[in-house]
Structure formats: structure tokens, C-alpha cells
């Protein structure tokens, strides 16, 4: 049986480019931020993210492959990684670790960003992003009308998911570690997968999702 012990985290890593020492307009931010820099822009403030640690990368790759296979097999839209920015409003550009854009909203994709929120965003908490992911992005995504927001915290082995109801987030209450998506019918996540030292194979996880989703709740 695979171990469920988390991989040790050595702490935050140093950003590759220091943020400007002043607020920038959106045009100035776009001119400053090149393709090698992962940065967000909120109310003129530039937030440069540290390079991801190994566990963060492994989870991002696993979840991207899992979600992308599910979505592609059903022709539901697109799954995109942290290379693309979502322009939530004229004052906010965020970079989710993972996002899903439904087929009927693909027209909002631009060359270098998504105009408006995705339908689902997933953030994987890093040592330097705890407040940002749990509070700041929660409020920003809620205000922008993001339909579903998932936060995965490897250090504390904790997952929370929220669906937008009448303009406010309500928690998607897990069922024995199973979190069901309200945006992607039939898709769910078993949080115990995420805490294993060796993540499951995508094909095995998909089979388990199919089996679990077909069981009566």
C-alpha cells in the first residue's frame, strides 16, 4: 500500500524577479511581466510568486492530467495551468494553479490571458501563499463570479471547495474525503490521493472516480 506520509517541505523559495517598488498601472504591469515571471496584479500591486517546490509541482501535474483527461474525454472545454493569467476585473489579474473554462465560454480566451473568471479554479497552497490563497483570492474570486474554487493545502493535508450561490461562496461539504464538483458533473476528488508520497496513476484515479460517482450517496 502506498504511503500517505507527506513529503517534507524545506520552506519558501526565492522569487526569480523582485517586484517593483511602486504600484503599476495595468499597462505598466503587462510591459514589466515577461513570460518567465509568474506574477499577479491587484489594485496596482505586483505579487511575484516564488518558484514552486517539488510537492507543489507534482500535485499540479497530477491534477492537471486528471482534470484534463476527464474534460477532454467529454468535450467539456479546456483545462489550463499556471502559465495563463485570468483577468478577473480591470483591477485584478490572478494566476490560478489550475483552471477549467467551459466550452461555451472559450470565446473569452485571449492570446495571453482569460478575460473574466474561469468556471473552476484550483489553488495549491505554498508556504508563501497561505493568506493569499485562503483569504485574498477567495474574496477576489467570489467578487468576480468564479463558479467554483478549490484550495488544496499539502502541509496541513486539507482540502476545501466552494460553490458560488447567489453571489456568495458556500462550502462543498466533503463526503468521507470525497469532494464532488458542482461545475463538472460526476467529477470528484478523493483527498487521500493527495497526501500519498507517491501520487496515484491518472488512469487508476479516473477509474476510481467513475466507480465512486456511480455509487449511491
Image (cartoon, grey):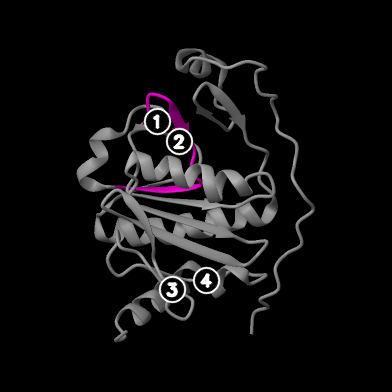
Depth order, front residue of 144/153:
144
Q: Earlier in the sequence, mark 1 or mark 3?
A: 1
Place of residue 126 in the rendered image (x, y in percent of width and height, measured from the top left): 65, 50
Q: Quadrant of residue 111?
A: top left
Q: Earlier in the sequence, mark 1 or mark 4?
A: 1
Please tell me the numbered disc located at residue 174.
Answer: 3
User: Which residue, given by chain and number where applicable, does mark 1 sit on?
Assistant: 113
Q: Which residues are magenta?
A: 88-101
Front label number (1 vs 4):
4
Distance from disc 4 to disc 3, alpha carbons, whole Å, reads: 9 Å
Place of residue 45 in the rendered image (x, y in percent of width and height, measured from the top left): 56, 24
Q: Residues within 10 Å of mark 1 (few under 14, many from 20)?
A: some
Which type of secondary structure does the marked residue at label 1 adopt?
strand
User: Which residue, given by chain and number where applicable, does mark 2 sit on?
Assistant: 84
Q: Residue at x 41, y 27 (%)?
A: 112
Q: Residues within 10 Å of mark 3 (few under 14, many from 20)?
A: some
Place of residue 151 in the rendered image (x, y in percent of width and height, measured from the top left): 51, 56
Query: Do the numbered discs 2 and 1 sit on residues whose CB atoms are within 8 Å?
Result: yes
Above or below for 57 versus 197? above
Amino acid at each position: 500500500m502506498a504511503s500517505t506520509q507527506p513529503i517534507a517541505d524545506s520552506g519558501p523559495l526565492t522569487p526569480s524577479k523582485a517586484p517593483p517598488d511602486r504600484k503599476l498601472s495595468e499597462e505598466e504591469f503587462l510591459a514589466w511581466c515577461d513570460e518567465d515571471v509568474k506574477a499577479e496584479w491587484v489594485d496596482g500591486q505586483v505579487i511575484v510568486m516564488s518558484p514552486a517546490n517539488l510537492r507543489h509541482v507534482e500535485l499540479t501535474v497530477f491534477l492537471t492530467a486528471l482534470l484534463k483527461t476527464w474534460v477532454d474525454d467529454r468535450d467539456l472545454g479546456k483545462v489550463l495551468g499556471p502559465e495563463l493569467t485570468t483577468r478577473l476585473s480591470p483591477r485584478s489579474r490572478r494566476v490560478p494553479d489550475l483552471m477549467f473554462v467551459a466550452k461555451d465560454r472559450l470565446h473569452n480566451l485571449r492570446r495571453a490571458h482569460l478575460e473574466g473568471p474561469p468556471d473552476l479554479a484550483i489553488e495549491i497552497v505554498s508556504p508563501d501563499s497561505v493568506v493569499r490563497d485562503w483569504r485574498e483570492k477567495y474574496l477576489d474570486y467570489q467578487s468576480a463570479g468564479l463558479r467554483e474554487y478549490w484550495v488544496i493545502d499539502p502541509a496541513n493535508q486539507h482540502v476545501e471547495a466552494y460553490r458560488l450561490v447567489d453571489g456568495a461562496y458556500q462550502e462543498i461539504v466533503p463526503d468521507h474525503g470525497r469532494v464532488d464538483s458542482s461545475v463538472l458533473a460526476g467529477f470528484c476528488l478523493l483527498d487521500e490521493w493527495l497526501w500519498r508520497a507517491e501520487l496515484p496513476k491518472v488512469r487508476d484515479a479516473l477509474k476510481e472516480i467513475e466507480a465512486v460517482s456511480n455509487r449511491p450517496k
